[in-house]
Image (cartoon, rainbow, N blue to C red):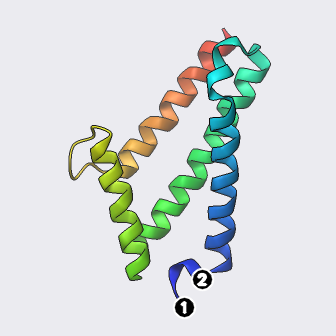
Amino acid sequence: MSFFDSEIVRAEMTEISELQEEVYGSVLKFPSMSNTDKLYHVELMEKLLDKQKVLYARLSLSDDPDAVEMKEKICQSAIMMGLPPNVDMNVVLGRMSEMLQVMKRQIDS
């Protein structure tokens, strides 16, 4: 069975896509949101990031050619966004989580 034939993987990818749509759909409104709405938005981003971390871990553990290809595409996209080659995506994802925590603290204060 292919990596992407797994019901669990397909369900996770669907949820990631839905979360991305919700986050991206309101990102431009963020500066004018109430603090409650801002916290909700950041919590959505945290949920999305957590799902992405799990998917990336699954991709990293799989030797399925489609999973290897998707992981490589993620790494290439990171390079195109300015990250150095061979960057550890787990570190990047961890730093993103830290940034979201900082955002939450700033909104709360």
**Is 60 rendered above or below residue 15?**
below
The residue wearing badge 2 is: 5
Find residue 108 and report its horizontal and vertical position in percent: 69, 14
Residue 31 in sight here: yes
Q: Is residue 20 left or right of residue 2?
A: right
**Is 98 rendered above or below residue 51?**
above
Find residue 63 and report its horizontal and vertical position in percent: 38, 81
Q: Amino acid at mark 1?
A: Met
Q: Is residue 58 left or right of residue 23?
A: left
What residue is drawn where x is 20% and y is 49%?
85
Find residue 97 and report its horizontal and vertical position in percent: 51, 37
Q: Quadrant of the N terminus?
A: bottom right
Q: Residues within 10 Å of mark 2 (few under 14, many from 20)?
A: few
Closer to the camera in the image, 34 or 102: 34
The residue wearing badge 1 is: 1
What residue is drawn where x is 64% and y is 71%?
10
The disc placed on residue 97 is none
Mark 1 and 2 residues: CB-CB less than 8 Å, in contact?
yes
What residue is drawn where x is 43% and y is 74%?
67
What residue is drawn where x is 33% and y is 39%?
81
- Residue 75: quadrant of the picture: bottom left
- Residue 107: quadrant of the picture: top right
Q: Residues within 10 Å of mark 1 (few under 14, many from 20)?
A: few
